[in-house]
């Protein structure tokens, strides 16, 4: 890939990332961070900050499987699906992360 094409691709990726940040900010009731003095914050609410990562890669199989199992558990217990908690035990201390779905509309962002 030539340098001009690479620069164009990088610019398009940045624009696409900003579009996703705007959509996610709206979905979580927050705003996109434009303050350059806090470069690590993508989206924020009054009480939380979010790092936004988008990808065109397929959802990992373990997430799809765990999500289906969680939906079945929610239906059979007549409760809301709270999400997936993934625990990484190969380090000390172990780390656990909560994965929840953020509802966004079906329309894809521009760019």
Image: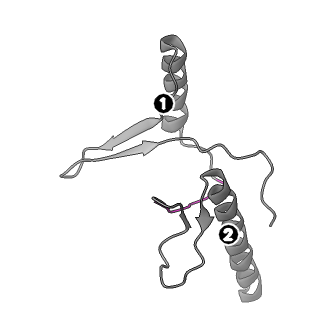
In the rendered image of this protein, does residue 25 appear above or below residue 36? above
Label 1 or label 2, whichever comes before in sequence order: 2
Q: Is residue 58 at least partly visible in the picture?
A: yes
Asked if the stretch drawn in magenta spans residue 62, the answer is no
Nearer the observer, 11 or 105: 105
Tell me residue 79's x, y (percent): 50, 20
Residue extending furthest toward the top: 76
In this rendering, the answer to whether 52 lies above or below 4 is above
Q: Which mark is in front, 1 or 2? A: 2
Tell me if I can see residue 1 in this picture: no
Numbered disc 1: secondary structure: helix
Residue 94 position (above or below residue 2): above
Query: Which residue is at 59% across, 60% downward?
Result: 30
- The majority secondary structure of the magenta stretch comes to loop
Left or right relative to 88: residue 48: right
Q: Which quarter of the image is occupied by the N terminus?
A: bottom right
Q: For the magenta stretch, what is the residue range?
A: 49-56
- Quick one: SS at disc 2? helix
Image side of residue 110 versus residue 71, left or right: right
User: What residue is shown with label 1?
Assistant: 66
User: Depth check: 108 or 22 in front?
Assistant: 22
Gap between marks 1 and 2 measured at Cα: 29 Å
- How was this image coloured? one colour
Where does the image place residue 10, in percent across and percent down from the top left? 68, 78
* Residue 76 percent across, percent down from the top left: 51, 11
Residue 87 is labelled as none
Q: Please tell me how crowded label 1 is: few (under 14), some (14-19), or many (20+) other residues with Cα within 10 Å.
A: some
Q: Quadrant of the C terminus?
A: bottom right
Left or right: 81 in relation to 4:
left
Residue bearing the label numbered 2: 18
């Amino acid at each position: 890939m030539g340098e001009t094409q690479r620069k164009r691709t990088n610019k398009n990726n940045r624009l696409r990332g900003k579009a996703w940040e705007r959509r996610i900010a709206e979905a979580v009731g927050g705003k996109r961070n434009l303050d350059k003095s806090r470069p690590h914050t993508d989206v924020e609410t009054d009480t939380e900050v979010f790092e936004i990562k988008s990808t065109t890669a397929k959802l990992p199989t373990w997430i799809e499987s765990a999500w289906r199992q969680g939906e079945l558990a929610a239906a059979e217990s007549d409760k809301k699906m709270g999400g997936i908690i993934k625990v990484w035990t190969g380090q000390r201390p172990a780390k656990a992360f909560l994965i929840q779905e953020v509802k966004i509309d079906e329309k894809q962002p521009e760019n």
